[in-house]
Image (cartoon, coloured by chain):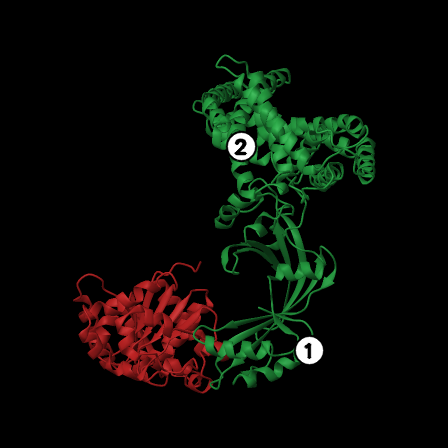
Chain colours: A red, B green
Amino acid sequence: MKILATYNIKGGVGKTAAAVNLGYLAAADGYRVLLWDLDPQGAASYLFRIKPRVKGGGKAIIRGSKAIDGAIKGTDYDNLDLLPADFTYRNLDLLLGEAKRPTRRLATLLGPLKSEYDVVFLDCPPSISLLSESVLHAADLLLVPLIPTTLSVRTLDQLTDFVTGFNGHRPQVLAFFSMMDRRKRLHLQVASDLPAARSDVAVSAIPALSVIEQMSVQRAPIGAFAPRSVGARCYRELWLEARRRAALKPPA
Amino acid sequence: MLDEAGAGLDELAAVAPGAGLRWADGDGDGARSCRRTWLDTFDWRLYRAGLTLEQVTGDGAAGLTLTGRDGEELAAEQISPAGQSPRWPAKLDGLPAGPLRELLEPVVGVRALSPVARVTSRLTQRRALNSDAKIVARLGIERMSVTSPARAVAPPRLTLAAVRGYQAEADRLGAALTALSGVTPANGTALDAALAASGQRPGRTPGKASAVPLARDAPAATAMASIFAALFDVIEVNVGGAVRDIDSEFLHDLRVAVRWTRSGLKLGAIPGDLAVRFAPEFRWLGDLTTPARDLDVYLLGLPAMTASLEAGCAADLEPFRGHLERSRATAHRALTRGLRSARFGRLASGWRAELAAVRPQRKGGTVAQLADDRIGAANSRVLKAGRRITPSSPPERLHELRKRCKELRYLVEMFGSLHDPAVRWQAERELKSLQDCLGEFQDAQVQREEIGVFAAQMLAERSAPAPTLLAMGEIAACLARRQRQARSQFDARFAGFAGAPSQARLAALASAASA
């Protein structure tokens, strides 16, 4: 089982859209996929038409994997399940703080799911917190959406430095440009230069497209309602790159 | 799983709102058609073990799936393209190596798998949505046209599957469905439904000699006639498989029924000269089957013999295997000629007609009295023959004892319905222990003699390279070791059989009339 997390300290950069679309594509490839909507706003749950509610809330989830098993919902798509968000997830930091080895807690909770899923996507809330640290420790691959600006690059450097300082398990980092506006010279410049200079930046990029905004109207991944769109193609390219980087074996 | 028997499926439309849901537009993934073929051995080994093996063919691919008692998938194998699927009937070595074959091997053994039912299936799907337009359950509607074992149309089958996390919604929908008139919970699998539609029931093949239900006070003559008739059913039902050479068990089961019949003829319970007239015919039938069966036993045991080689290797024995297979093909042709001969036809029609005419005999006694008398006598003969055996007895003496044991075993099994099952099971177990030892001794003796004959034949045909002869010599030595080992176990096995507890059980079996 590989754990892929979409993470950025900033909000509104395309984390949830990436988690939903990549999760959908992984499942369509035949992988058994679980997407965990860790964001109390519950956007990923909304996009899959699943109520953002978990029995016992974040407290039950952090306590044990039994609650996780009972909370998982099947999506409308084969091989793709969702662990929904809950508004109490806003307190996950506090709950983790009370747990033993809080930064390893997520990895421990996901351990029993190894036989059931090939890939787990963690859709993280925008923050630097105990939760995000636990996510970074659990993940095999961090997918970091970046708006192609100089400041975003600085944020990526900070994240990379932080992860490099981990003892033991360190996730790989794969940043990708998101919400790229081809009319902006700076976006084009950064998106062209950086992947050539850095191996932790994906060649694939996700442009700012109305079809991505349509996801919240359709409440579905792009591949389900616009499979031949540019957006669907871009996410497919990103998925292929992420799959390669995560060294995922072909599905059984 | 639900069966829709009488109601029109149109009524389904009203079911979802009743459960607080609605149906999605369209047929989901669309209608799909496929061919479903269920496979089992002739004696329903999979069915009796609670297993179902199914081949589904459609869209240019075929897949085999093995499921357990509760419909849970145990193993699956994809065969693509569909043209590469085995031609049924087929033995397990015709399947790709893998988990499916490994699970089947201990149950299926040497038997071949044959289609027991075939259907053309058309599956449509309806999706039940909640108020968020989220799919919470899927309803499959399957219409099966049965093409084998007889043409028929099975009632539509509904399968309701909850999406994970939405069991409560699916249960509400299920309750609304079962409230429809004509929709009833299905009692069995799709195989059961296909067989029921064609008027068949699974597990109903009289493929093996077994105890016939008997009343204790039934006249001995008519009871024996019913036993003989049931045994001839077994013979006839196995003829087709033996002639087509589907697997070696057809011939084996046919032979066992012949041996039971020959043993029964010696009981003297049927009137007139029937036994005198038909005993030679059944001896002919038994002898007809012997060469092919002996070679089957050799070929079935060859992998174990090959594995026991220390100096030689498997490749050395390939010419020997080829010789055995050629000899077996010749023996099988002779067997086929015999089973298709006018003589066999006359035996069948004459025997059936004579059995139908058997009437109770004056002074013939009841079947329970007959069983008591003959089991008691057969047991005495076993004890007498066994006690004569000393460490210096020749192999013929042990062979003689083996025959007496078989006679006793056939009687115990033939009259099994007259006895307490627990006592009979224990008595058979003790007798079988002695028989296994004698069988091992005798089979090793015969095979050791035969391997010398095979070697001479191969030399004459110039088909025996030196490594092959050396490996065959190793096998002969291995057989001699096995024979010595069996002989060393004999005293203890016989003492167990002749001991008081075992004899008390046989005495109980020999007193059915007074029970």
Give the CA distance from mark 1 to mark 2.
58 Å
Whichever of labels 1 and 2 marks the residue nearer the N terminus, that label is 1
Residue B35 can be seen, yes or no:
no
Residue B321 is left or right of residue A142, and the answer is right
Q: Quadrant of the N terminus of chain B?
A: bottom right
Q: Which residue is drawn at 51% across and 81% down?
A: B129
Q: Is residue B487 above or below residue A245?
A: above
* Residue B129 falls left or right of residue A95: right
* Tags 1 and 2 on a common chain: yes
Q: Is mark 2 on a helix, strand or loop?
A: helix
Amino acid at circle 2 = Lys
Q: Residue B114: x and y, percent?
A: 64, 48
Residue A17 location (% of width, % of height): 38, 79
Residue B59 occupies quadrant: bottom right
- Residue B368 position (above or below residue B177): above
* Residue at the spot 44% in from the left edge and 82% down from the top edge: A49
